[in-house]
Amino acid sequence: PVLDACAACETVRPGAVPAAAADAVREAPVNTAIGGLECSILTPELGLPARVSLVFLHGFCNTADMYTGSEAFTLFRCQGLRVVLPTAPVLAITAHQGTRQNAWYNYLTDHDGKQEDDIDEQSLANLRRQVAALVDSEASLLGDSRRVLLGGASQGCCAAFDIFARHPSRLGGFVGFVGHPLQCTPLAGSVQKDALCEWYNGSADETMRLSWVRPAIHRLREHSWSSVRSEVAEGVDHGTSEEIESQWMDEFLGRFFGTLS
């Protein structure tokens, strides 16, 4: 079940209280540009200094606004979690006849969920430079790259893991919702092999189907990634819900914060 309050300080999750009270609990996001990306930043609650930073990438065709009001981060913001939510650049999508969409990289094909789509790797490389600069900025702010987490949902999950796996500094961990490792992401030799790496998918997902997503995640173990967790939620489709994403995020952050001294 989803927790309604922080186990450490009993801060209430906003969804468990009336809307007026929730507004008083939740700090407003700060909007700024970092690494060439427009970002919304959710600072720690209660005036706490930042202990951990999570850079989280939204899904295809969305913006950071999708998560600025999300309850998924609430419980750990009162323990020093800083959340950085960049908005994807607008790209012409080849698989969609050049339609311009907010996207982390360009799709060359659309197999309608039957298999992994082909992507424009140059567009991914361009993004990787931007998000890596953002990650490095957060590491500088905290004084330790191992306190910077990367994550995302759907296309944002795939992009975030590619950036995570290739980053030259050991980061704190990765969390991905309804996504998968890209075929083009190198796994051997990554300095992240022993970092917390958690994947959450739905059994009813027709966009990124378990028939090919599970083997993609299993490749990490074949390349000696030692801290991989994979969880499948029964009956959950690609659209998920705020409730299930809050549960997933609570599990991941609970494990990570439990490792901090």
Image (tube, rainbow, N blue to C red):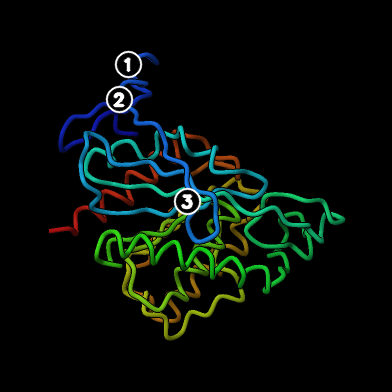
**Residue tagged by mark 1?**
21
How crowded pointer 3 is (Cα within 10 Å; few <14, some 14-19, many 20+) is rated as some
How crowded pointer 2 is (Cα within 10 Å; few <14, some 14-19, many 20+) is rated as some
Work out which residue is located at the far right of the displayed protein and give it.
Answer: 97
**Residue 49 position (above or below residue 133):** above
Q: Which quadrant would the C terminus be assigned to in this image? A: bottom left
* Residue 225 position within the rendered picture, expressed as x and y whole percent measured from the top left: 38, 76
The residue mark sitting in front, 3 or 1, is 1
Q: Secondary structure at mark 1?
A: helix
Q: Please tell me which residue lies in front, 208 or 77.
A: 77
Amino acid type indicated by mark 3 = Val
Amino acid type indicated by mark 1 = Ala
Per the model, the C-alpha gap separating discs 3 and 1 is 34 Å
The residue mark sitting in front, 2 or 3, is 2
**Residue tagged by mark 3?**
232
Per the model, the C-alpha gap separating discs 1 and 2 is 7 Å
The residue positioned 49% from the left and 39% from the top of the image is 67
**Residue tagged by mark 2?**
25
**Residue 207 position (above or below residue 27):** below
Dividing the picture into quadrants, the one containing residue 13 is top left
